[in-house]
Image (spheres, grey):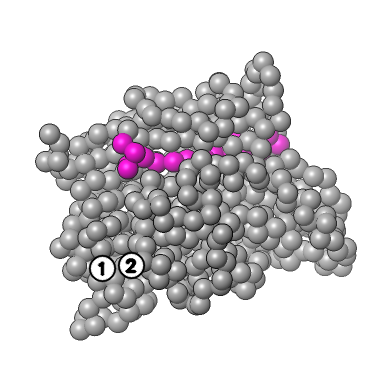
Amino acid sequence: MVDLATPCQGDNYSAQQGCFEGPEKLLEVWFSPSAQRLADHQDLDYFNSSEEDDGSSNNDDEDKSEAIARFSPPRPHRRGEYPVHHHHNANNINTGLRVVPRSVWDDVLALVKCTVLNVITNDHVDAYLLSESSMFVYPHKLILKTCGTTTLLLALPRILEVAHQYCGFEKVWRVFYSRKAFMFPERQVGPHRSWDSEVEFLNKYFDNGSAYTIGKVATDQWHLYITKPADDVLHHNGVAPLAVESSSPKRHAAPAAAAAVGEMNERRVDREIISSGQSTPVTVENPSPFGTGHTHADQTVEILMRRLNPEKMQKGFYHDPSLTELGTVGGQFVDQLTGIGALYPEAQIDSFLFEPCGYSSNGLQDDRYFTIHVTPEPDCSYASFETNIPVEESHATAGDGQSPIETLVSQVTNIFDPESFTVTFFTSHHHKDNHSHSHMVRSMGSMPGGYKRSHRILYEFDGYDLVYGHYTKEQQQH
């Protein structure tokens, strides 16, 4: 049985439990492909309704329970059926999930077993720095990343309930859940005791999910659960979903099976997979399912590093009272000392140095983010880097022959000097003329700094491509 006692503000639950499990659980729940399309996708007539319509009717608890019990098929609703707290404007301020009160998010995070350390915000997103990693709240999506023995998935029902109660959201457009193999899987609790248990839990809430395990070596594997985008989004702007033939259609049909390039180790927990390899349609009129105003595809890059350089860890990520304070002041000191602050010089950064060691940071740059979390102890050293800032925008080739993704990876790994690391590079099908699988694969060859690629795969999903690569220092190869 999982203990759901609320942690105190600033507590690090995992540290108290004696578990420094670095690899994070990462959940993304999208209620629309973009903030601009929320009203259409969720059928929110009240975005343009008068204030007298707001809160004109109250729905009872039974209705809400039915609405969140299974959050995939849309359920019709009437104008004014839900309490409305939206204040719509061109900059997406105070719309969608961003209207949810801080106290409500605190309660959600208590289910996860973590607390809020600090919050930064801009016109597009709220970034929560947590005692165990990070949360990013956009109008149309929530990204929650937690490490240690946190119970992230136990908060999923409440997240869906909050989205329904405060925003009137009735359906999910897409869900991503991923994590690297745990270092100490026996210490996990609740649904996180095994990958199969996590998938079983997610399948209780979503009809259209598929699960994958990627990688050769069990200790370095990466797990992914992904749902197919809601079909009604693809009908917008005259774009219809691709027809996929199936001899026995299922209510819980999973997304199109991924097409892999190179050797792969894949385990599908959900067996109801339609074999097509097709992706979200792309046209000249509608080059992206993510709305207008985006000059680059939707991207997410993760760099997951193990066995970090002990000297660099001792110098940069342990608290030395003679040099700096703890908390945000110490975090700023680490940013300058290690070069983290130079990764995105224009970003707004919120960082935190823990006692006796450990570091976390969030960064915001317009409507994009990056986040870094470091566990420096020698027995379980681990660091993670994640961003959705397009690499073509932030790390364009500087004439040294490296691709943008190689430049970014090199800059990050230079800070931590890991013995091995995994890169996952998600990118949406955006501009058809620039979409090249072979370019993606070539862009993640052997990395600078003496790292040799031991594994690389290309997966093709509905609307996204994923390149996975695992790298080790060449002197470790025999």
Q: Is residue 421 visible?
A: yes
Q: Residue at point 68% right, 61% down?
A: 162
Q: Which residue is tagged 2? A: 359
Q: Amino acid at mark 2?
A: Tyr
Q: Residue at x 69, y 26 (%)?
A: 250
**What whole-number distance in Å separates the C-alpha atoms at marks 1 and 2?**
6 Å
Residue 317 is marked as 1
Within 10 Å of the Cα at label 2, are there few (<14), some (14-19), or many (20+) other Cα atoms?
many
Q: What residue is rendered at 29% in x and 50% in y?
A: 305
Check the image and name the residue furthest to the top.
Answer: 247
Residue positioned 65% across, 30% down in the render: 253
Q: Amino acid at mark 1?
A: Phe
Indicate yes or no whether the magenta region holds residue 222. yes
User: Image quadrant for the C terminus?
Assistant: top left
Estimate the x, y position of residue 239 in percent, counting from the top left. Answer: 67, 31
How many marks the image carries: the answer is: 2
Provide residue 443's location: percent of width, then percent of height: 30, 35
Percent x, y of residue 276:
55, 21
284 shown above or below 385: above
Instruction: Report the side of 228 relative to 450 (left or right).
Output: right
Location of residue 132 by image quarter: bottom left
Q: Is residue 443 visible?
A: no
Magenta stretch: residue 278 in it?
no
Image-based side of 78 in relation to 256, left or right: right
Q: Quadrant of the N terminus?
A: bottom right
Q: Which residue is more in the foreground, 203 or 277? A: 203
Residues drawn in magenta: 217-232
Q: Secondary structure at mark 2?
A: strand
